Amino acid sequence: SPATTSQPGRAPPCPAPPRCPRPCPASSLPAACSSFVLPSITVITWNVGTAMPPNDVTSLLHLNTGETNDVDMIAIGLQEVNSKINKRLKDALFTDQWSELFMDVLSPFHFILVSTVRMQGVILLVFAKYYHLPFLQDIQTDCTRTGLGGYWGNKGGVSVRLSIFGHMVCFLNCHLPAHLEKAEQRKEDFATILHMQQFEGPVANGILDHDLVFWFGDLNFRIESLDICFVKYAIDSNVLSQLWEKDQLNIAKSTWPVLRGFQEGPLNFPPTFKFDVGTNKYDSSAKKRKPAWTDRILWKIKPPSKGSGTGGHRPSQGVLSVSQLCYCSHMEYTVSDHKPVAAIFAVQFASKVDKPLVEIYVADEWSRPEQAVVRYKMAVGFHRSSWDWIGLYRVGFRHPKDYVSYVWARSDDGERCLEKQLCAQVMFSEEALPKGNGEYILGYYSNTSSSIAGVTEPFQISLPRSEEGSSSTDSSGSSSEEDDSTLVLLAPKSRSPSPGKMKRHRSRSPSLAKFQGLILRPSSRDRGTSRSPSPQSRRNLPRNIPTIHLPQEELRHHGVKSKELGHAAESPEGSLLYQTVQEQGGLRRVSADSSLARADPRNLGLLPALRLEMIDQALGRRWESADQGYYPCRRMSPTSPTGCGTSPKEGHSP
């Protein structure tokens, strides 16, 4: 059992290799497997027309069929997501509603958000089963604007590229120019996207350099020559083949060199544009747009290169095959004037990577705090960092930052363990462990690659809950003052175990650091229904959320009586920061440099649905936090910014 303690100065021996968590040929590639077939990848494209998400997307994701157990990855491309300025500000602080919906629906099926990228209204989400995460590496994103001559992101393309079991795969979601006469403009924009998007690394720097490319989105190709009456007749008579030869994309595939090698399944579903919103009727407005297959999904396999397998080339070509199992539209969704389109692919890979970068060993059950010992072994060539950490995840977690707790993956003999292939060892503190019974997973997060490099099989944690009759003191040992306080946004210099700086994400969005002076408080309206990635946010919420007391001149402006004022604590630069805590029926002042203001957000039960309670007057005076943020903070969603800061010191526990 890994609960045993190793001798000081010596790394514990490694246990036997773990067994395959899933059948080898079907769904994963653990260390003991020598060949691999990835059963299927689902690709979805949907122009949502700035609509709110529907209540149910299970049929779109094919979750209501037996196919779910065979799908290993899902790529979702959205276009025209609401990107008005007020909506973009909210989405910059918190996860957008569409991403929240897909994470909520897919997490019970063990899908984890691997990567996401957004350019105004164009979003790309890539999900995978959790046990594939160690074999999804070199994850990078990019985006290219083509609207208004390249200055506006309403049109263009976003991409996620990654290595899947040693094969380079790129998902490209595009929104190209509209209208029948803009076919040449669509070709030029697509060529621009292919030229502009470049990735770092020794292989697959361009999109078409990847072993496999999925190209999808609202490509906006139309049906030429035929009038609207004939098009509707062919649709009503189900003779869609009569429209195929006049489809602009079908014509372009045989005439445009940039499209050489791209493949697409037969269009056996009705054109997906343009419908009256809320119906399945084609456009009845005065414009009466001609129906068209604007929403498409194509793929391309890189042809074998000369001398493949020699001279430094990776011998992966020639062993990659793709079969399209399904290509269909979903008429049941009527929130947009487009219908979503889905395709399911069976992809066969050669197993070039047959071992995770980090192997993690734990006991089958943690029933006592002293059993929370984790041993891990790093592969030769693994680039470890002092910022690597091991996260404890509840089964059904949504993304790599959705951890229950974490421990820094650093030990005194870490470098020696890597060099001599020994196991390093870390231990979770009792305060960091969840109470009660449940299934959990450990994952090793690599800061260098910004991905999970190793996971365990689910194991059981059975620890006694805190006493029912105890006071409001938090079970982790935090004081009641910390629990009942209003959260003050920490300085944006403290470093998180889930680093907020996405090194390979080149799109630019507002950072939380620009909103200094905000005091945030959970919204009571969302207290019980928020989609929080933080498991603690649903436990031990204080019944009475304290208020924020403002200066007298501010309160007079808002009509607040002076007798409601508490004493003020003045900040170093003249800005006034007021906090109150409930303590035995009275009020107590808390200054900006107190332990309350520097509290770890992990212990405050922070909800992701927050309401802006106060902005420093006119946002004119910028003041620095009295504390520079030495406490690690956690990112509440994969797209929300993180305020963070100083480097961890060896031997310093988070």
Image (cartoon, grey):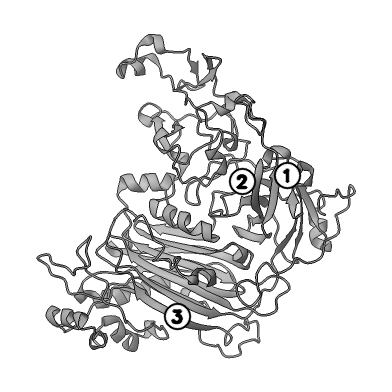
According to the image, label 3 marks what residue?
A: 325
Q: Is residue 287 left or right of residue 567?
A: left
- Quarter assignment of residue 355: bottom right
366 in relation to 469, above or below:
below
> Regarding mark 1 in the picture, which secondary structure is present there?
loop
Marks 1 and 2 close (CB-CB < 8 Å): no
Of callouts 3 and 1, the N-terminal one:
3
According to the image, label 1 marks what residue?
A: 428
- Mark 2 surroundings: few (<14), some (14-19) or many (≥20) residues within 10 A: some
In this view of the protein, which residue sits in the foreground, 81 or 507? 81
- Mark 3 surroundings: few (<14), some (14-19) or many (≥20) residues within 10 A: few
Q: Position of residue 634 (x, y in %)?
A: 57, 43
Of callouts 2 and 3, the N-terminal one:
3
452 in relation to 623, above or below:
below
Q: Amino acid at mark 3?
A: Leu
Placement of the N terminus among the 4 image quadrants: bottom right
Q: Is residue 260 left or right of residue 354?
A: left
Q: Position of residue 89 (x, y in %)?
A: 37, 45
In this view of the protein, which residue sits in the foreground, 445 or 64? 64
Residue drawn at (51%, 60%) of the image: 115
> Regarding mark 2 in the picture, which secondary structure is present there?
loop
Of callouts 1 and 2, the N-terminal one:
2
Q: CA distance from mark 3 to mark 1?
A: 45 Å
Residue drawn at (42%, 28%) of the image: 621
Placement of the C terminus among the 4 image quadrants: top right
